Image (cartoon, grey):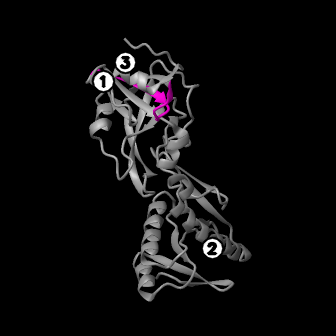
Amino acid sequence: MWGIAVGEQCRRVDVHDKYGGSKQGGIVPSNTSPNIMLFTDPSRGHKLGYFDGWGGDGLYHYTGQGRVGDQEMNRNNGAVLRHVEDGRALRLFEGVGSGVVRYIGEFALDSSPAWYSTDAPDANDEIRSVIMFRLKPITASSSQGTPLPFTPADHQVVEDVEIEKQHTEGAVVSPNKKEYEAERREAPLVTAYRDHLQEQGHTVTRKKIRPKGELKPLFTDAFDITTHTLIEAKGTVTREAIRMAIGQLYDYRRFITPKPSLVVLLPSRPRDDLIELCHSADVSVVWRDGTTFLSDTAQ
């Protein structure tokens, strides 16, 4: 019998003394009772790539276990997926340390689907694929707990948004120091190029893209509505950065109809071989030259 009431606070050590399971970790299957204890702490978890919380669909979205590298559906993650066939209840607690935790309630995996994948930074600030379980409350109240920062889209959404600092992909996908430094270099470049285009009478925004089933939106750096051109900026002219820009442009272009022209925006002229690389992918190159911008257009 389960003896902890929804909303009740208790010491984590007491939970494990009574119901079993490890006193550490986020997903804790018990060998002495038919339970899997799930622990969450959204105030700390967001910094480590764990985006747990209530979604607009009335479900609790819970990040799988694994702090480094792509998460896989094995071990404790697999135990959550098999909880019904193994005869175990999912018990969610808020708080992951060794102190006081609060019981959120009993859950079961939703069936459509039970989980999905999304991107998040790991403990080393590297982007990896994580498992997000969709938990349906049985005894919990959706008024309790922390809201999800973003809710998975049930259909594709593409819209224009203003070019503002808070509208950045790194801010929502990889809120870490490395991404911050990259955006710090790219932001003034994008702003200057936007001003340059607007002086020529162009209308410039950026695209906010919500692919179906994805947790977080994608943001392009800029979109020239006048010429129907998609622009991705990089703060350096390294091969790695330009390769990444080409990949991002092709990813974003899938969602825009009709297909736009593609431009990589750079702080200076790249090496000839890298310009040739862009042209081979039908991507034009624009770079800053003092107070103006020069270009090498893909044929």
> CA–CA distance between discs 3 and 2?
59 Å
Which segment did they paint magenta?
87-102
The image shows residue 242 at horizontal and vertical percentages of 46, 74
Q: Which residue is at a point 31% across and 36% down the rendered structure image?
A: 76
Q: Which mark is residue 18?
A: 3
Q: Is residue 95 in the magenta section?
A: yes
Q: Under tag 3, what secondary structure?
A: helix
On the image, numbered disc 1 is attached to which residue?
Answer: 84
Q: Under tag 1, what secondary structure?
A: loop
> CA–CA distance between discs 3 and 1?
22 Å
Q: Is residue 145 in the magenta section?
A: no
Residue found at the far top of this picture: 1
Mark 3 or mark 1: whose residue is earlier in sequence: 3
| Residue 26 seen in the figure | yes
User: Which is nearer the eye, 289 or 258?
Assistant: 289
State which mark lies toward you, 3 or 1.
Answer: 3
| Residue 107 seen in the figure | no
The image shows residue 190 at horizontal and vertical percentages of 63, 70
Mark 1 or mark 2: whose residue is earlier in sequence: 1
Q: Which residue is at a point 46% across and 73% down the rendered structure image?
A: 241
User: Which is nearer the eye, 200 or 277?
Assistant: 277
Amino acid type at mark 2? Leu
Mark 3 or mark 2: whose residue is earlier in sequence: 3
- Where is residue 90, by image quadrant? top left
Relative to 265, 97 lies left or right: left
Q: Which residue is at a point 56% across and 83% down the rendered structure image?
A: 268
Look at the picture and state if 54 lies above or below 70: above
> CA–CA distance between discs 1 and 2?
53 Å
Relative to 40, 289 lies left or right: right
Q: Which residue is at a point 38% across and 40% down the rendered structure image?
A: 64
On the image, numbered disc 2 is attached to which residue?
Answer: 189
The image shows residue 239 at horizontal and vertical percentages of 42, 77
